[in-house]
Image: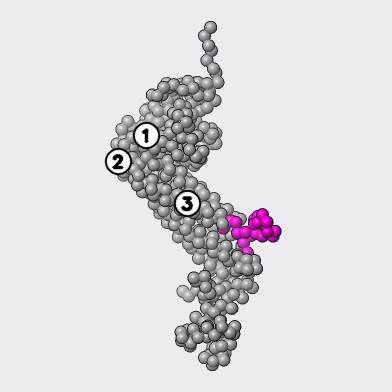
Amino acid sequence: MAQQPDSQFRIEHDSMGDRSIRSNIYYGIQTLRAIENFPISGIMPLDTYVDACILIKKATSFVNGELGCIPLDVSQAIIEAADEVLGGKFRDQFVVDVYQAGAGTSHHMNINEVLANRALEILGSSKGNYQQVSPNDHVNYGQSTNDVIPTAIRIGGLLALSKTLHPALESARATLEEKATEFQDVIKSGRTHLQDAVPVRLGENFRAWAQILAEHQNRIYTASGDLMALGLGGSAAGTGLNTHPQYRTRVVETLSELIDIPLEPAPHLMAAMQSMAPFVNVSGALRNLAQDLVKISHDLRLMDSGPKTGFKEIQLPPVQPGSSIMPGKYNPVMAEMTSMVCFQVMGYDSAIALAAQAGQLELNVMMPLIAYNLIHSIEILGNTIAALTERCLKGITANRERCLAYAEASLALVTALNTHIGYLNAAAVAKESLETGKSLRQIVLEKKLMSDTELAKVLNLEEMSVIRE
């Protein structure tokens, strides 16, 4: 008696042979080989990157169906499958490790196989019946890993920026401006080289940070313009082999409508495939933002240091106990986390730069690394800024008495005397004050260098801390 086939498995075939795959799995034989080949990090593709790939497949299937390149019923089934994935289904089927085959072929075929097998079910057929819906001949018609993946990085980057980073930056900027207004009357000692400097307004510290973030956001907007030129339609080597003459422009128009971002065909498809410069440019803008975020987070930690033996000019909201052994200790954990994320983004930027220069001839095969690092950088920066804003910036309070005490005690106030008693006299007054403990005011009056009325006017902290226009 012949052995009955096991209904829990199906047999799939590729150019290397046959493999058995569980019937409930939507990916196919090429994905299975990639799982076996790349048990590297356990890091699966980012949801935003999957979304970008699925959006491309939706757009290409729509256009290829309209142009008669694939059957309309197949086109519609692929689009329906794509919409299901975009709605959150089958996410556990995208399983290829971030560190994988060059250019991203393994991940790309994972996308193609899942959509093909789900489209087969929609059409009433069974998974693996690739004669009816093929991952290569239908889902991937007119495409190649070599033009799809650089396009997916562009789309993924734009989606991550619009959904995650830009909203977080807007909220952080608004919060810092609100704090600037709240603290505008708080006078504190400035510090340069971590030494006493002339007095400043605490509000201006926060306003400066808001301006820094605004300038970085503008740089990121400018850099991200490079992501809007798509090389989709170049197929294998940038020549457009096996594509319909209208495909290139129509698929970009369709993608633009799907994500509501103005896109355009790249002026030279081969160049768009070979050069990773747009990704390096955006990554560099992210690194630049990260560097200033580290500075801001370190400032917050210094200004909140204490409570008894540090500056304690501001109070960051306590969000969790800060020590496993010291009771009552609260650490600036949100600022600390911010710095760590920023260091990771800087590391990702270095890896992107190395990968970008490692292409040869018609292709850069390091794109999977660039895809993960760039999109992940955008998303963790956005999530970090959002968390810092909600859990830290919005709850900051000022220690007004401490700020004023430091400002009044600062030897740097002597700077205001320079134009009245001369630099050398002012330096001598500062030195004597430090050695004797006498105030600057007391020494100046004892030496009869200025009158009491004149001195009171010159050492007016309110006036000294105003920003001159």
Q: Which residue is mark 1?
A: 144
Relative height, residue 27 to residue 343 (above, below): above
Residue 400: image x %, image y %?
63, 71
Q: Which residue is mark 2?
A: 361
How many angstroms separate mark 1 from mark 3 (CA)? Answer: 30 Å
Q: Amino acid at mark 1?
A: Ser
Residue depth check, mark 1 versus mark 3: number of the one nearer the observer? 3
Residue 360: image x %, image y %?
31, 41
Q: Are marks 3 and 2 in contact (CB under 8 Å)?
A: no
Q: Which residue is mark 3?
A: 345
Which callout, 1 or 3, points at the residue further toward the start of the chain? Answer: 1
Disc 2 element: loop
Camera-nearest residue between 432 and 269: 432
Residue 207: image x %, image y %?
52, 65
> Residue lying farthest right?
327
Which callout, 3 or 2, points at the residue further toward the start of the chain? Answer: 3
The majority secondary structure of the magenta stretch comes to loop
Disc 3 element: helix
Which callout, 1 or 2, points at the residue further toward the start of the chain? Answer: 1
Q: Amino acid at mark 3?
A: Val
How many angstroms separate mark 3 from mark 2 (CA)? Answer: 29 Å
- Numbered range of the magenta stretch: 315-335
How many angstroms separate mark 1 from mark 2 (CA)? Answer: 16 Å
Residue 248: image x %, image y %?
35, 37
The residue depicted at 33 percent of the width and 32 percent of the height is 243
Disc 1 element: loop
Residue 181 appears in the rendering: no
Q: Is residue 400 left or right of residue 103?
A: right
Q: Amino acid at mark 2?
A: Leu
Residue 436 appears in the rendering: yes
Estimate how packed mark 1 is, as few (under 14), some (14 to 19) or many (20 or more) residues with alpha carbons within 10 Å.
many
Q: Is residue 274 left or right of residue 33?
A: left
